[in-house]
Image (spheres, rainbow, N blue to C red):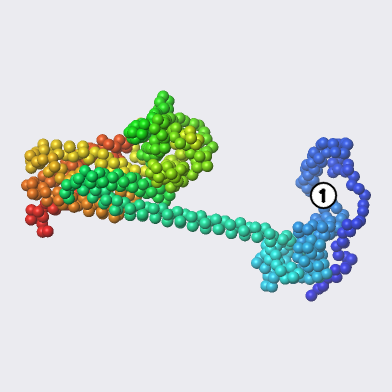
Amino acid sequence: MRTVNSNDPASAPRFDPEAQGPAPDPDATGAVEPPPQPEGMPGRETHERKAAWRRGEARAAERAGGSEPPRDPYSGLAHPGIAAHAFAALSENVRDYAIFLLDPDGVITFWGEGARLMKWWTQDEAEGGHLRLLYPDGGSEDGTAEEHLLQAARDGEYTGEGHRVRNDNSTFWAGVTLTALRDPEGNLLGYAKVTRDLTARRAADAALVAAHEAAEQARRHAEEASQMKSLFLATMSHEIRTPLNAVMAYTEILTMEMAGPLSPAQHAHLGRIRTSSQHLLAIIDDVLDLSRVEAGRMVVGRSVMQVDAVVSEALALVEPQASAKGVELSSAVSGVASELTAWGDSERIRQILLNLLTNAVKFTDPGGRITLSAGAALQPPDDIQVEGEGPWIYVRVEDTGKGIPADRVQAVFEPFVQADMTLTRQHGGSGLGLAISRRLARLMGGDLTLRSTEGLGSTFFFWLPAAPAEMVRADMGHPSVATPATTAILREVRDAILAEVERVLYGFVARLRSDPATPSAHARTEAELEDHLASFLSDVAQTFGGMDLAAGSDGEGIRDGSDIQRRISQRHGEQRFRLGWAESEVSREHQILSEELAAAIRRHIRRERPHEVEEMIDAVRVFLAAGERVSIESYRRAAGVLSA
């Protein structure tokens, strides 16, 4: 093994920082012409840059002509001794890098002060030692010293990262560059090694990776928790709906005095039960809506709708509530505003407006005022979250109510939160309406925002993407992106059946008494013909409104509702047999009932896409067909055709 004498005078000279020399010439230049005078005058730098460009062009032309300008590959235009002094100066004075030299076999021949400060090996220890003394036993993550020397000799350079060993056997993460040094004939003279301590950077990178992984894990956990919460809410809502539907159905049965006559006080108690049940059912509907939105199962349509039409419908529905409380309700949607059109799901838009209006009525004192207006904007305000270039349509609901404190404005859009929880106890409600409304607005590409001053009132802005007015006609009758079997439509059908029960019963009885196919009904009393049909229809409505077609309609609530309908249908078949009806008359009366109920639903529900209403009517007919089958079976058993 060859050794090197570190005191060999042939080795690179040490830089003496105490040495003095002449001061640099301030007018020195690489240009032919002297720089602008005096010193510090603007333009001296540009003068030098222009000279550099000209010099580069001249040398390139020389090379193209076959005459290479004289230049040493290691010292350039400098004297070789100057280049050696420069290397020594860098090695001794640069602190961020360890710079040292090795001979062709990898033995260290020059060890600078920067190398000592980084690697802690002294000059006496390092010079004369092989490069491998800086590597862990068996090599580092990036390989061994011998492999790196071989690669640098073969390729001209090795660059990599890995652990290196200090004087006290501690390690640090190093970024290294090992460069082969050759003479003009290509003979290997040795190697130059530059090392940088990357421990801090690597630790920072590791911390960033760990933070990213922790954030990603937290995000996954949050999503899982949100999904579990939504599943829990949906499951609990369905579980609560199951007994609630039964309570409402049995309340109707008691009200019909099927188990015996009731006193006025008992009727009043049943009325309170019915009202409380309907209130609880509305809260359950809100919880289900929220769980669907958060679980990503809420589907909204995208069609063109006229703002004025939806606003008018919402106002008509809220007008009785406002009048009863003595709150003035007015619409300023007129003129140009009445012709505005927007993209969205008209059913969901109506739901949002109803929520805003009912809240305004709820929290506005008698004698107050609620005003609806609409408009358009090319650019939305900074406080809304929308995507796209616009333009935008907004509906503004402004009231003179109690207002909301500034620190509670955003909180009212969170689930189960209201501006003042004492108002929740006073006025009722779950605190879900605004949370659902904002989520629905954003699903449609819009937003819902609020401006409020405590004591002066609140103003809600409902934003939607604008649509060309000429598309309103083209969009009529065409299916929306959303499937029609949405919860909102189901509830709308439920409400239609409940609202039209009396009218359905009247038409049903009138047709039975005049239809040639039902002669047994012509002389019967109204009570005999109706035969608890009101309870049957009420239970169908409640069961239908509780369906969730997206999740499947075979839940406990549907089965419990069908059980009540089955009991009523069984009694109906028995009653028709006792009255002497023919089986064909029982079938005919169910056909009449189906026609009357379909007409009632069409009267009560006015939608832009009639095919959605027809699909819901077909779904209702499934319940009626099941009731008809049970009635026929019960009729046949009473007649002795079927065994009990």
Q: Nearer the viewer, residue 240 or 56?
A: 240
Residue at which label 1 appears = 69
In the image, farthest residue toward the bottom: 1
Q: Say what secondary structure mark 1 lies in.
A: loop
Q: Is residue 132 visible?
A: no
In this view, 448 is above or below 95 = above
At which x and y percent is residue 304?
A: 39, 35
Residue 412, x across and y down, in percent: 46, 43
- Where residue 340 appears, as percent x and y from the top left, is 42, 30
- Between residues 179 and 240, which one lies in front from this camera angle? 240
Compared to 383, does 153 lie above or below? below
Task: Please tell me which residue is depicted at 88% across the width and 36% down the height of the picture.
Answer: 37
Q: Quadrant of the rendered structure where residue 205 is?
A: bottom right
User: What amino acid does circle 1 point to?
Assistant: Pro
**Vertical arrangement, residue 639 with respect to residue 588, above or below:** below
**Residue at the image point whose x is 27% and y is 51% from the top:** 247
The image position of residue 298, as x and y in percent, is: 39, 47
Question: Which residue is pictured at 42% across the width and 54% down the height?
Answer: 229
- Which quadrant holds the N terminus? bottom right
Instruction: Tell me the quarter of the picture where residue 466 sits.
Output: top left
- Tell me the quadrant of the picture where the C terminus can be found: bottom left
Left or right: 384 with respect to 164?
A: left
Q: Nearer the viewer, residue 461 or 371?
A: 371
